[in-house]
Image (tube, grey):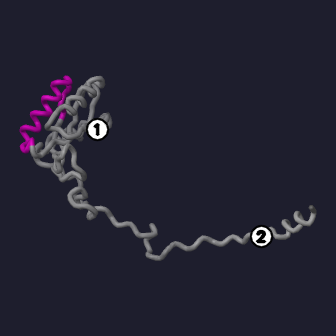
């Protein structure tokens, strides 16, 4: 069995409480014969665009172990589910036991603070991204014009060709 990291996006209007979310994740893990290591609420946000006519969703971070062949079954079950809007499954071999123990120590129904020192970029458009200068430089001066390359006039060469005929 291989370790995986998954991000589930649940429909906030259908599944408002943590118990229902956790029950659905456990049901999915049982269907693929997987071992749930940790499931923790990541955040509830307004979506950048509508998914299945929904504007808000609850992100849930899940670490689990399962057979590689069963991941396609998990993806199929998610597509058929009305509770889950999206699923992203990544290889979790780089996740250490210490990280999993750290996540288990946190309360599962309290959202993680994904960006503690940064503004929340997903809740209002344009306020979280630093503004880039117009010319891509730190000062406000425009870039220097390209250097002009002198071009030799080929008029003499043309004159020789026309007179030779």
Tell me residue 102's x, y (percent).
19, 43
Q: Name the residue under label 1.
A: 95
| Quadrant of image for the N terminus | top left
The numbered disc on residue 115 is none
Graded by Cα atoms within 10 Å as few (under 14), some (14 to 19) or many (20 or more), the crowding at tag 1 reads few
- State left or right for residue 82 relative to residue 134: left
Tell me residue 96's x, y (percent).
27, 37
Q: Of 95 and 7, which appears nearest the observer?
A: 7
Q: Is residue 101 above or below residue 68?
A: below
Q: Of 82 and 155, which appears nearest the observer?
A: 155
Q: Check residue 39 for magenta coloring.
A: no
Is residue 85 visible in this depiction of the protein? yes
Q: Of 23 and 16, which appears nearest the observer?
A: 16
Q: In which quarter of the image is residue 154?
A: bottom right
| Quadrant of image for the C terminus | bottom right
Q: Check residue 31 for magenta coloring.
A: yes
Q: Is residue 153 above or below residue 3?
A: below
Residue drawn at the location 22% of the way across and 35% of the way down? 63
- State left or right for residue 30 relative to residue 2: left
Is residue 102 visible in this depiction of the protein? no
Residue drawn at the location 32% of the way across and 37% of the way down? 94
Residue drawn at the location 88% of the way across and 63% of the way down? 161
Q: Mark 2 points at which residue?
A: 152
Q: Is residue 34 above or below residue 42?
A: above
- Tell us which disc is closer to us: 2 or 1: 2
For the record, the magenta segment spans 14-37
Mark 2: secondary structure: loop
Q: Which residue lies furthest to the bottom in this view?
A: 141
Graded by Cα atoms within 10 Å as few (under 14), some (14 to 19) or many (20 or more), the crowding at tag 2 reads few
- State left or right for residue 82 relative to residue 145: left
Instruction: Give the mark nearest the N terminus, 2 or 1.
Output: 1
Tell me residue 111's x, y (percent).
14, 49
């Amino acid at each position: 069995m291989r370790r995986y990291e998954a991000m589930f996006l649940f429909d906030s209007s259908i599944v408002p409480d943590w118990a229902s979310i956790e029950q659905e994740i456990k049901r999915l893990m049982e269907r693929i014969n997987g071992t749930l290591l940790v499931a923790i609420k990541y955040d509830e946000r307004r979506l950048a665009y509508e998914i299945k006519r929904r504007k808000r969703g609850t992100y849930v971070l899940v670490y689990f172990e399962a057979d590689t062949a069963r991941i396609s079954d998990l993806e199929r079950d998610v597509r058929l589910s009305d509770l889950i809007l999206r699923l992203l499954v990544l290889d979790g071999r780089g996740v250490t036991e210490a990280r999993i123990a750290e996540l288990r120590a946190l309360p599962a129904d309290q959202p993680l603070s994904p960006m503690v020192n940064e503004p929340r970029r997903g809740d209002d458009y344009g306020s979280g991204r630093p503004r880039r200068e117009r010319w891509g430089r730190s000062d406000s001066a425009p870039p220097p014009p390209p250097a002009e390359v002198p071009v030799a006039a080929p008029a003499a060469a043309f004159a020789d060709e026309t007179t030779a005929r």
